[in-house]
Amino acid sequence: MNIPPVDLVRQYKLISEEIDTAVLDVIKSGRYIGGAAVDNFESQFAQYVGTTECIGCNSGTDALYLALRSLNIGPEDEVITSPFTFIATAETISLVGATPIFADIDRNTFNIELNCLEKAITPKTKAIIPVHLFGQPVNMTGLMEIAQKYNLYVIEDCAQATGAKWGDKQVGNIGHIGCFSFFPTKNLGTCGDGGAVTTNDPAIAATIRTIKEHGSQVRYYHDMVGINSRLDSIQGAILQVKLRYLDRWNAQRREVVKRYHELLNAISGIQLPQEISGGYHVWNQYSILIEQKEITDKLYRDQIREKLQEQGIISMIYYPIPLHLQKVYQGLGYQEGAFPVTEKASREVLSLPMFPDITFEEQQRVAYGLKDALG
Ligand SMILES: *Cc1c(COP(=O)(O)O)cnc(C)c1O
C-alpha cells in the first residue's frame, strides 16, 4: 500500500453521514447558488476567524484578486510578497496590473524575512502579502510594525494556514484582509473549489461583495468591472460540517508532527521544520530540507524522493522553482542568485506525507524509508 501525501477519502469516511446529509439537503432544497448554506457558513467562518466580515468566493486565488481590487491596487503600484509560495499569490498581483516585488525568506520558517521585506519597500509599494506557508504564521507583530511605519496595506495569504494563530489572534484577523482557500488539500478543504475573504472593515467588505457580483449592488445595475466569484451552496454546506472539526484536525496534525520529530530527529543530513515561538503552526505540510552539498545536474533531494517512491512513499516538492525564476516573471528582471535562501530551499525542500489521520505505522514506514534512502 502506498502512503499518499494526503488521504482525503480517509477523512471523508469518518464524517460521511454528516457530509452526505448536508449535500443532499442542498440538492433537495433547489437553492444551489447562495442561500442559507452560504450565508451561515460565512457568519460561522467570520466568528471562527474573529472578524466582523467574511465573504465567500470561488477560490483562494479569487480571494487574493478580490482583496487587491478592493484596495484599488493597480498599475504603478508594487506589492511585496514571498518568492517561495504558490503562483496564485504573485499572479493575482499581476492580474490587477500591479507589479509583484519579491523578498527572500527565512530558512527556518520558509516565510518572508522581515529585513529583506523592509529593504524591498519603495515609494511605489502599496501592500504586502505575507504568506503563512505550510501552516506556519508569519511573525505578524514585526510585519505589522513595518506596514504601519510605511503606511502599507497587509493582505494575509492564509490559504495553507486556516486555524493558525499569531499570539492569540487567528491568521486572517491581523492584517487588513485575510484570504483563504478551501481547495480539498488545505486544512479546511471542501469537495471542490472554494475560498473566502475576511476583514474587519465594512467598506472593504462591501466593495468585495460588489466586485464578486459583476460589479453590481442592485441586480442589472453595474457600477464597476467585476467578476463572477461564488462559493457554491453545496460547498458552503460541506464547509459548515468540516469547520466543526477543524480545530480537532489541526490538533491531530500537531500530534503527527511530534511523532515525525521523534522518528526523524536522529537522522543526519536533513533539517526538520520548526515552529517559531509566538505562533500556532497548523502544519498543512511537513517539509524537511535535504542538504545539497554542491549543485549537480541531479539534485540529491530528487534522488531521495525517487528512492522513497520505490518504497511506496509519495512525497511532494513545494516548490521546485521560485517565482522570480519562473518564465512568466522573466520580464521582472530578477536573476538567479537574487534570493539565495529561497533558491537553496527550492533545491532541498521535500514535503512528507501529512494529514490528520496518518497512522503511527505509516509514519514509521516513512522514517525507515527516509533513513534507508539517505543510506
Ligand atoms: C492554494 C493556495 C492559493 C490558491 O488557492 P486556490 O483555492 O487553489 O485558488 C493561494 N496561495 C497559497 C499559498 C496556496 O497554497
Image (tube, rainbow, N blue to C red):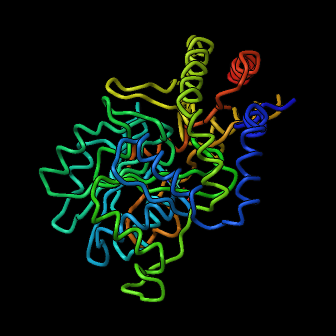
Q: Is residue 338 visible?
A: no
Question: Split into 4 quadrants, where in the image is the N terminus?
Answer: top right
**Picture coordinates of residue 93 (x, y %)?**
39, 67
Horizontal arrangement in the rendering, residue 156 relative to residue 86 (left or right):
left
Horizontal arrangement in the rendering, residue 23 relative to residue 137 (left or right):
right
Q: Is residue 203 visible?
A: yes
Residue at 51% of width from left, 70% of height from top? 328
**Picture coordinates of residue 108 (x, y %)?**
40, 30
**Quadrant in the rendering for residue 141:** top left
Which residue sits furthest front?
29
Relative to the observer, which residue lies in front, 17 or 49? 17
Count of numbered tags: 0
Relative to the observer, which residue lies in front, 174 or 89? 174
Horizontal arrangement in the rendering, residue 199 relative to residue 54 (left or right):
left
Q: Is residue 362 above or below residue 288?
A: above
**Picture coordinates of residue 110 (x, y %)?**
43, 38
Residue at 77% of width from left, 38% of height from top? 16
**Picture coordinates of residue 184 (x, y %)?**
65, 48
Relative to the observer, which residue lies in front, 345 or 1? 1
Residue at 46% of width from left, 42% of height from top? 133
Question: Split into 4 quadrants, where in the image is the C terminus?
Answer: top right
Relative to the observer, which residue lies in front, 117 or 41? 41
**Quadrant in the rendering for residue 79:** bottom left
**Quadrant in the rendering for residue 265:** top right
Which residue sits furthest bottom?
221
Which residue sits furthest right?
1
Residue at 63% of width from left, 60% of height from top? 233
